[in-house]
Amino acid sequence: MPGFPVRRMRRLRRNERLRALVRETTLSVEHLIMPLFVRPGKGVRKPIEAMPGNFQLSVDELTAEVARLDALGVPAVLLFGIPDAKDEAATSAYDEAGVVQQAIRAVRKTTPRMCVVTDVCLCAYTSHGQCGVIVEKGGEKVVDNDRTLELLARQALTHARAGAGMVAPSDMMDGRVGAIRKALDAEGMTDVAILSYAAKYASGFYGPFREAAESAPQFGDRRSYQMDPPNAREALAEIALDIDEGADIVMVKPALAYLDVIRRVRERFDVPVAAYSVSGEFAAVKAAAERGWLDEKTIALEILTAMRRAGADILITYWAADVARWLKET
Ligand code: PBG
């Protein structure tokens, strides 16, 4: 390749037409999934303080929000539930009349073409806020992997029966993708896809979400099941196992501080890769923008484009509706 002055890198940056012509990465609305929080009640639109512009919504408000997202071209939503009651066994997580199950049925009626993805995890439904069933082992409270699997499979089944097109297990128990696939297939729901939170790290970036989902652990933390942030090879092992168990799409979460992991997953595996730009990533930018220190739109588009450049096919982001609007403007 010739050097300067024969080769001038600025030649193709002279105007927007040229820049667009040689642009390597695109960001468009069809890649986006918008997370939404649903709670019991009617007419409820409760702001989530650390996530400006996001709300806990009752089912009626949620269906209105989904219709707006659909009109903007956002193809998918990821539903999280905030139940009325929590207990040790996370009973409300697999209640056919639970808040997420109701929300799925409602959305299927009001906006049938919306792809409804549901978070499958017990943490918002357990009184202790851990993602699985707690047992005593040697005088210590631990999350029991194999007992949790059964409950996760039940939860996923109730979502699928209500009409979810995709279930997204986020608990990080070993074997849950296989358990869920088996349960779905046994009921003939072979078309319901699994988007696995395959490489999910024990991250400080989930802080605002735990306010949003009211799911903070009441004791301990999640490091006995979520991944240790310094590890990347381990993420590849997690992903290989989930694909083997039947994951249709694999996710890396969080995204911004884990772009290297997204890249390695993209290069190693041939299934679609999703990146979850989590609550803390969103909140940090919002806070800086409120102070006038960063421009929100510029930063959000840059961050999300970087995730696509790293290799993500799908982006789960609280900016989904904003991005849809911003892209329409330009
Ligand atoms: C549930 C779950 C969490 C998130 C998604 N599903 C929280 C956690 O694991 O503590 C985080 C999402 C976000 O921060 O935006 N297990």
Image (tube, rainbow, N blue to C red):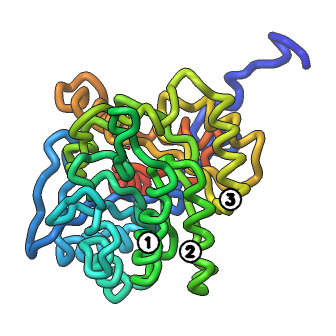
In this rendered view, identify the residue nearer to me: 150 or 310. 150
Instruction: Please give the name of the residue rendered at 56% of the width and 74% of the height, measured from the top-left corner.
Output: 183
Q: Is residue 69 left or right of residue 165?
A: left
Q: Residues within 10 Å of mark 2 (few under 14, many from 20)?
A: some
Earlier in the chain: of badge 1 and badge 2, it is 1
- Is there CB contact under 8 Å for labels 2 and 3? no
**x, y percent for residue 36:** 30, 60
Asked whether the residues under the numbered discs 1 and 3 touch, taking CB atoms below 8 Å apart as contact, a structural biologist would say no
Looking at the image, the residue that sits furthest to the top is 4
Label 2, label 3: how many angstroms apart (C-alpha)? 12 Å
Frontmost residue, 149 versus 188 = 149
- The tag on residue 154 is 1
Q: Which residue is the site of mark 3? A: 245
Q: Amino acid at mark 2?
A: Ala
Q: Quadrant of residue 184?
A: bottom right
Are the residues flagged by discs 1 and 2 in contact, CB closer than 8 Å?
Answer: yes
Q: Is residue 330 visible?
A: no
SS at circle 3? helix
Residue at image point 62% right, 38% down: 262
Q: Position of residue 116 (x, y in %)?
A: 43, 72
Residue at the location (30% across, 26% down)? 294
Q: Look at the numbered disc 1 and give the secondary structure of its residue.
A: helix
